[in-house]
């Protein structure tokens, strides 16, 4: 059973096939745009870091900062001790003079 179109396009000079083609083209454009948006969302989701990964990264950075701070404190302490030794040496030299 063939359905008759509910709209008569013959008076406008446009055939039903032309209308179908225009609609199909527009649907294809929309489909392509939606697929592009979905692909972009997938890429963004792939780039998004997990909360667990962020916590691990933060913990690793804090550990490194602690190590650096400890090393700086040891060096400052060592410099302080060396300075004390040098001052004591100079004091002894001055007292001998």
Image: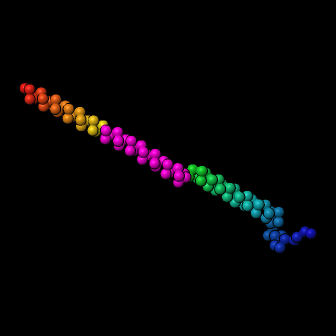
Q: Is residue 70 magenta?
A: yes
Image quadrant where one finds the N terminus: bottom right
Task: Decide if residue 23 is in sight here.
Answer: yes
The residue at 24%/35% (across/down) is 81
Q: Is residue 88 above or below residue 34?
A: above
Question: 61 or 26, which is in the foreground?
Answer: 61
Our reading of the magenta stretch's main secondary structure is: helix
Quarter of the image containing the C terminus?
top left
Q: Which residues are magenta?
A: 49-74
Locate residue 91, reporting x and y percent. 12, 31
**Could you tell me residue 52's position as x and y percent?**
53, 52
Q: Residue at image x 73%, y 61%?
A: 27
Q: Observer-nearest residue: 57 or 87? A: 87
Residue 97 position (above or below residue 62): above
> Is residue 60 highlighted in magenta?
yes
Residue 40 in view, yes or no:
no
């Amino acid at each position: 059973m063939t359905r008759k179109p509910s709209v008569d396009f013959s008076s406008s000079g446009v055939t039903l096939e032309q209308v179908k083609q225009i609609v199909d083209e527009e649907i294809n454009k929309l489909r392509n745009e939606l697929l592009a948006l979905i692909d972009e969302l997938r890429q963004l989701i792939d780039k998004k870091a997990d909360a667990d990964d962020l916590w691990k990264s933060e913990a690793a950075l804090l550990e490194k900062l602690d190590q650096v701070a400890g090393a700086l404190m040891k060096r400052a302490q060592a410099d302080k001790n060396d300075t004390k030794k040098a001052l004591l040496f100079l004091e002894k030299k001055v007292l001998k003079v």
